[in-house]
Structures are given as structure tokens and as C-alpha cells.
Amino acid sequence: NASIKAESLLCTWHECSLSATSLWHTSKNDTSLLQVLSHNLCTVLNVPHDPVALEEHFRDDDEGPVSNQGYMPYLNKFILEKVQGNFDKVEFNRMCWTLCFKKNLTKSPLFISGEDAFKVWVIFNFLSEDKYPLIIEPDEIEYLLKKLTEAMGAGSQQEQFEHYRINFGASQKGLSAWELIELIGSGQFNKGMDRQTISMAINEVFNELILDVLKQGYMLKKGHRRKNWTERWFVLKPSSISYYVSEDLKDKKGDIVLDENCCVESLPDKDGKKCLFLIKCLDKSFEISASDKKKKQEWIQAIQTTVNLLRVGSPPPHKEARQKRKELRQKLQAEQEALEQQMKEIQKRKNDLSAQEEEAVEQQLEEAAARAAEEEKKRLQTQMELQDRFSLELEREKMVRQQMEEQVAQKSSELKQYLQRVCELEEMYKQLQEALEDEKQARQDEETVRKLQARLLEEEVGKRAELEKWHLQQQQTIQMTEAEKQELETQRIIKERALQIAMQQLEQLEVERKQALEQYEEVKKKLEVAANKTKSWKDKVAQHEGLIRLIEPGSKNPHLITNWGPAAFTQAELEEREKSWKGKKSTS
């Protein structure tokens, strides 16, 4: 916690120095802008603000912001010493950038946007030296430009940087923030690249160096409650993995807190999901599916490396590399200062000596100059060796990383085979248990069947006796049924004969009815002829003798009308014939 707070305060000092320097050179003794800066700093850093202390601190001097009564001592005493580290660094950086970029950034058009310039400014504060005024060393510039070119996919541009180093000049020890922004924004190191590619590269380096983003990307995560798979944007940091709805980082869904007890392991494909791995923590575990095998191995290696760093208490790789470069520069600077001090002592001793000793001193001075030249040569050789060693370490680190990836892949394959063997053994054990259960169940079924067979045999004996009894009864019933059947057959034959006789009689009656109908038609025709004759005679008699009423003979009973016309028989005759037919049917 102390190191994190010190680092936060260091970044705060850098950024406030830039802002305060810009405001001081524009306002001089006018403290109104510094009051605005102090108030904004206290608001962003969550520090109580005391405007009276600022008025009492300043006096009528004009020695700059780092004087005894300047703004830097006030900033250290009344603001930075009260910072607890619980502030938003991005908002703080943006506030400082807003206060100072208009006064310091050149008016010439840049190839990068204002947001990208702000990110370069924040990266400068991270890589700059801990001294005033703030500058960034040439090796840090080389490191930053290499990171940008790698992020753009352009490869290393060592020859171009060496040419720039020569033109940079030995007299100039570094660049300010605004010179660095102008260098990157001029397009010298991004020829052939469009604005979007450069912006993506700056954003990637900003995420790594400032936001401590070690890795990020889309993956599928299995839910703990619904057990469904959802796509999330994962961001790996030194102590946690955050996952969001999308890469804009607006809707955060949760965190996976990492510590030295966490571990990550590969999982076999299941439920239609491939490239699975598991992150085990103390409270819960997380199942994640990567897009392909390469992404899976990269995430497993990155998470395992982060956990290993937490176990040994090491900072993130980019911060550790920055510290090593800084220590190397300090060591070389100390050697150079010691050499300069030695030269000054020799020169002082030379001035104090008499004329007789000048020759000896000159000889010693020449020897010292030769030794200094030799030391400078050795220093340069040591620097080249250190650079070569650093390059070798990078290559060795890449080889180790590749070996680790191969080992992780091999371990993942072995783990997959082991898990497959475990699954096979579990399946065999399950089948063996099922076989034992089946055998036990079969024996129980056999015992049940044996008891059932004994009971069935007893029941069969009883059933046999009962069946024999029923058989005898059935034989008797069959004999009785046969006799009844013969009697019924005889009755059937008699009834059929009677039915045939009745049918013959019915046919005879039909014939007789047709004959009677024919006779009726003849009689009807004769009657019509007679009626016509009678009518004619009536007319004649009426004409000669007057009206005469004739009485015609008629039937005493009503005539029946059938579908074929008037019936040949009367109702009484039909009833008589029906009684005769029923009597014959009953006798038959």
C-alpha cells in the first residue's frame, strides 16, 4: 500500500508540476489561477481545501514555482501530503491536462487527435524523470516508440531511431511533454499508417502502462445461477479480472479478484463449448470459453503469470522494466559524475602545484585523460553490453515464454488425457456399479420368480382339479346343448317350410291381386262407357220429358285405394284373409 501511494504521489507531482509551471509562467504573481488549480486538485484528490493557507504562503517574490515561497512547496505541504490514494487517476490527469495544454501545445496541426495527445501526455508523466523540469530520456523515448510501432504492427524501427538519436544531438538530454507530443503527432514514426491505427496503438500502450491492463478481449462466461453462456469483454489487471458487456467499459458486470491462492486450469470440451478453462478462487470458480486454442493458451499463461507475480510480490512487468531502466541510468550517471569529480580534483591539484611540478602533473593529467578515455570506452562498452544483455534477456524471455506456452500446452494435453482417463475410469466404475446392481436385482428377481413359480404350481394343481370339474360340467352341458341344438334345428326346418308356404301363398295372392286389378280396370272402363251412355240418355230425356233423377247403385262399404289404384278386395275380405293366414302360420 505504501509503494502504491508513493507511486500515486509521484505521478501527482509530475502532473501538478506541469500544470503549475504553465500557470506560473502565465500568471506570475496573480494567484487566482493557482487558487483555481488548488481547488480543483483538492476536489479531484478528495483533500480538504484551505484557501487562506495559499494566500499566507506566497510572498512578493518572482523566483518561480519551485522557490521556497513558490507553488511547489505549497503543493507538497498542503495537498500532496494529505492524499490517501483513493482518487480517480484518469479524471485527475484530465483536469491537469485541461489546465495546461492550451498554453503549451503548439498550434501546428498534428496527425493525432486531442484525446490521443492527452494519452501521450499521461504516458510522458509515467516515463519521465523524477526531477524538475520534467523530461523524458532518449532510451525511454526509444522504448515508447518501439511499443507504439509494435502495437501498430509495423515492426522494429531501430535504424530510424538511431538516425533520430544522431539528429537529436548530444547536448539535449531529453524531451518535454509537448516536444514528445509534437514528435509523435508529426507522423515521422507512423508513415503509411492511418489515424485510426495510430489511435488504436496509443490507446493500447496507454491501457498497458497507465491503466495496468495486461490483457483484454471478448470471451464467453458461464453464469453461476442460470448456467447460461454470455459473451463478455474481459480486462486482466495485476490483481483482478473485470468483465463488461462490451469493450466501451460502460456496463461493468463483475470482478474476479486474484490472489496468491488462485489457479487456472484447462478443461475438456463439453456442452457444445470448446477452448474451456477454469479460474479457481477461494469463494467461487469461473468457467470461461475462449474463441480458439491460441487465445485460450494466451489467457491461461497471462493469468498464471499474474498469479505468480502476486505470490512473489513483484510489480507488473512494465513497471519493473521501467525501474530497471531507471536504475541503469542512475548507475551510468553516478559513474560519469565520479569521473567528472576526479577530473575536477586533478585540475584543482594542477593549479595548486608549482611550475616544477607542472610537467609531472601534465603527465598525470594525460594519464588521467587516457584513463578517462579508457573509462569512457569501457562505459560505452558496458552500456552496449547492457543493451545487448537487455536484448538477450528479451529474447530469453520470449524463449521462456514460448517454452512456458509449450509446457502449458503439453500440460493442458496431459491434463486433458488425464481427465479423459478419469472420465473413462468413472464411466467404468459407474458401469461396474450398474452391473452389480443389475446382478443384485437379478438375484432378487430370481428369488421372487422362484417363489412365484412355487405359488403358481400350487395354484396350478388347484386349477387343474377345478378345470377337470369344469370339463365334466362342460361335457354334460355340451350333450344337453347338442340335444337342444337338434330340437332347435328341427324347429328351424319346420319354420322354414312354413315360411316357404307363406311366401307361395303371398305370391299367389299377388297374382290374384293383379288379376283383380285388371278386372277392375275393365269394369271401370265399362262403367265409364255406361256413364257416358247414361248421360247422353239423360240429356235426351231432359230435353223431351223434363228433368229425371236417376238413382245409381253404389257400394255399401268404402273402397280401399292402394299404390296400384282401387283395391280388388274390401276391408272385410282383407281382414278375413289375414286371420286365415295367421292361423295357418301358427299351425305350421
Image (cartoon, rainbow, N blue to C red):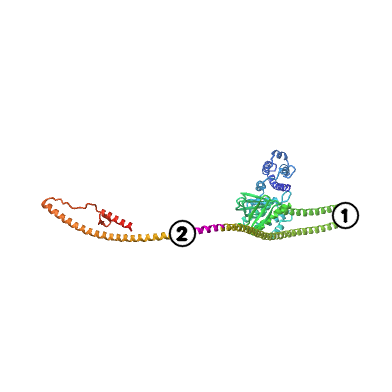
Nearer to the camera, 13 or 272: 272
Asked where in the image residue 357 lies, by quadrant, the reply is: bottom right
Left or right, 279 with reference to 500? right
Q: In this rendering, does residue 265 appear at all? A: yes
Q: In this rendering, does residue 192 appear at all? A: no
Left or right, 377 with reference to 413? right
Residue 393, percent from left and from top: 73, 59
List the residue tagged with mark 1.
Answer: 355
Dot 2 lies on which element? helix
Please provide the residue range marked out in magenta: 458-478
Residue 105, percent from left and from top: 66, 50
Nearer to the camera, 411 or 77: 411
Residue drawn at (18%, 57%) of the image: 529
For label 2, the crowd category at 10 Å Cα-Cα, with few meaning under 14, some 14 to 19 and many 20 or more, is: few
Disc 2 marks a residue whose amino acid type is Gln
Left or right, 231 with reference to 511? right
Assign the magenta stretch its main secondary structure. Answer: helix
List the residue tagged with mark 2.
Answer: 476
Q: CA distance from mark 1 to mark 2?
A: 168 Å
Residue drawn at (16%, 55%) of the image: 534
Residue 85, percent from left and from top: 70, 45
